[in-house]
Every structure is written in C-alpha cells, then in structure tokens.
Image: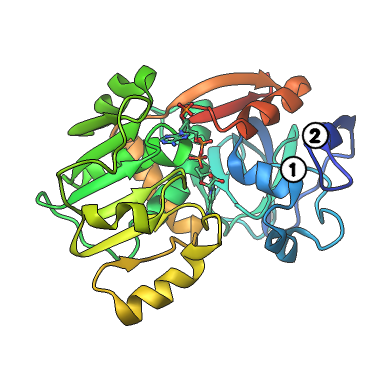
Amino acid sequence: MKAVTRNQYGPPDVLNIEDIKQPSPKSDELLIHVLATTVNRTDCAILRAKPFLMRAFTGMLKPKSKVPGTDFAGIIEEVGAEVSDFKVGDRIWGLNDLGLSSQAEYMVIKANQAISIIPNNTSFKEAVACAEGGHYAFNFLNNLNFNKDTKVLVNGATGAIGVNLVQLLSEKGVQVTAVGNSKNIELIKSLGAKKTIDYLLEDFTIDNEKYHYIFDAVGKSSFYKCRHLLLPKGIYKSSELGPYSQNLYLPIWTKLFNSQKVVFPIPKNPKRTIEYLTNLLRKNILKAVIDREYSMENIKDAYDFVESGEKTGSVIIRYK
Ligand SMILES: NC(=O)c1ccc[n+]([C@@H]2O[C@H](COP(=O)([O-])OP(=O)(O)OC[C@H]3O[C@@H](n4cnc5c(N)ncnc54)[C@H](OP(=O)(O)O)[C@@H]3O)[C@@H](O)[C@H]2O)c1
C-alpha cells in the first residue's frame, strides 16, 4: 500500500511516500481503508517532536511509528474475529492524538478505541475535519458550567480548535464573542458567534465587556493581558503553554492566590469526544470547516501550510 513515512523527527522534508506492507488486523482490531485524513497541528508537533515532552509518548530517539497521522475517515475492510460492534463496509471515523498511522491507504485500529460510525448526512472529509480540532475544543469545556447567560470570549476562532469551540459553545446557548481575521468574520458569525472582533483591526483586550470564560484557542494571548476582561470568578484557558510555559504553573498559583483562575485544557478521552461529535454531526449541529485539500503525494506542502499557522479550520488529505 502507499503510505507517508518518516524515520526521524524533523521538518516536513523528512517525509517520504513509499510502498509498504499493508497491516493485518488482530482479533480485536479493524482494517480500515482510509479515504480522508487531516494534517493538523498535533501532526506537526509529533513530526518535529516539539514540545520535547512529546517524545515520552511518541518515541524518545525516533518516532515509534513509521507512518504519521492522528485521525481518519474511511471504510471497514476487515473485522477481527472478536469484534462484534462493527462490520465490513461500515463508514467510520476516529482519532488518536498520540498517533494512528493514518496517513496511509490502510490502517488498523482496536475496535474499542475512539471511533464511531459516520452519520449518513456527513461525508468522509466533513467527519475527519472535525476530529482533532473538535477534540481539543471539547476538552476546553471540561468541568465548566454553561447557560444562556454565560459570556465566553474565544480568541483564534478561525483555527481548527476555534471553529469547533465556537460551535460547541453556541450549541449550549452561550453568548460567544469570537476573535478572528477580517476574511473570516462572516464565517465565525455563521458558526454562532453573537459578537465578533477582527484581530487585524482591533485589540480584543481593549474591550468593555466582562466574561465568565476566556478561551484562547490559538494560544496567542496571556492570562495577564486578559484578566481585566474576566468576571471576579472568571477562568482563562489557552491551548498553548505560553512563552514561559506559564500555563502549566499558573493553574496552581491562581488556585491558591487568585479568585480568577487559569486552567490548562489537558486533552483526554478522545472516545468520549468522537461519540459526542458524531451525535452533533448527525443532528446537523456541527459544521465542518475545511480550508483546502491536498493529495498524499503533496503532503509536505500540506505540512508546510499547516505549520504556517494560517489555516482556517482543517486541511484535508484525500486518498482518491
Ligand atoms: N494543548 C494541546 O494539546 C494542543 C493540541 C493541538 C493544538 N494545540 C495548539 O493550539 C493552537 C491552535 O491549534 P489550531 O489547530 O486550532 O490552530 P490553527 O488552525 O493553525 O490556527 C490558525 C488560525 O489562527 C488564526 N490566528 C493566528 N494568529 C492569531 C491571533 N493573534 N489572533 C487571532 N487569531 C489568530 C489564524 O488566522 P490568520 O490566518 O489571520 O493568522 C488562523 O485562522 C496551536 O498553537 C496548536 O499548537 C494545542
């Protein structure tokens, strides 16, 4: 089968396209014919092993897995003897943000992992476009309460995390203020934002509004620049650790000494996310935002573009 491969950590130049042996499913696994995947910011982090901590999960000296990729949408081609929940021909999607070897024509995955049947109203590309960004967006919501009076500011509303986060919050009836670029203001309004701020024209930190939560989905702000926008018991979450890794220790500091808190949205339980997102896709509540598509042969260009930090929503790799 044709696959994207790499033997070392590094820039997109370390990637090759090779013919390698097709994997065979074990008794508790499925063989998937992959029809779409994404190149996302998690793939880029794993590709370069940055932050260094990543190596604890993906391989200390070189990648444990020769084939990259963290998400997929495709068709079940073979089912292990012990698997009863899925059958050959099922349309399926899933995610493992530590690596799935999905940037290949075929992959195997255990049937109890973060996978689900793609609803009939959703294409392969639409499903996979919601996987990685949707997972991190869903994890921003952990352990928080929302109602129609909750005010949330989302910075970076045009990224893969941001477009999903605005939709997940809007679905809960929350009043969302979304910060994005000029060309995407109409898009973020269409995802449910009640108020928009164009970051190319205005600094969102100069705002009179006060928020229950500030979610920086692109990790470009800091708690100190935003705290005056938070209500007294407000919470700040960012998808990045910050230039001094401060979003790792500020949660402890603010828990002890502040009424306003910093919480780091540690991603967990992708199975729960995929089930939740599948339900929203089925009800037409979640809309996939796709920036552009590449063929597998042009995967290096896809990684270069995603690393530029300029994509809107997701970048798709198509296999047909
Ligand atoms: N904590 C985790 O486990 C985890 C997991 C995945 C990703 N991440 C991190 O989360 C961040 C977001 O990921 P993503 O996939 O959503 O990113 P992304 O899709 O690459 O985000 C790109 C978008 O962010 C916008 N943007 C850039 N600078 C901005 C600014 N100063 N203010 C507002 N918007 C800005 C860009 O608009 P323009 O084109 O106008 O610049 C673009 O639309 C990344 O830094 C990524 O490394 C963290």
Q: CA distance from mark 1 to mark 2?
A: 7 Å
Q: Is mark 1 within 8 Å of ligand 1?
A: no
Q: Is residue 89 left or right of residue 196?
A: right
Q: How is the image coloured?
A: rainbow
The amino acid at mark 2 is: Val
The amino acid on which the numbered mark 1 sits, given as a three-letter code, is: Pro
Report helix, strand or loop for mark 2.
Answer: strand
Residue at image location 78% in from the left, 21% down from the top: 297
In-front residue for pair 230/148: 230
Query: Which residue is tagged 1?
Result: 68
Quadrant housing the N terminus: top right
Counting residues from the N terminus, which is met first, the one under dot 1 or under dot 2? 2
Q: Which numbered marker is on residue 15?
A: none
| Horizontal relation, residue 36 to residue 48: left or right | left
Residue plotted at (49% across, 59% down): 267
**Mark 2 neighbour density, 10 Å: few (under 14) some (14–19) many (20 or more):** many
Q: Is residue 139 above or below residue 294?
A: below
Position of 284 with respect to 139 (left or right) is left
- 111 and 41: which one is in front? 41
Q: Give the residue at mark 2.
A: 4
Q: Position of residue 237 (x, y in %)?
A: 38, 57
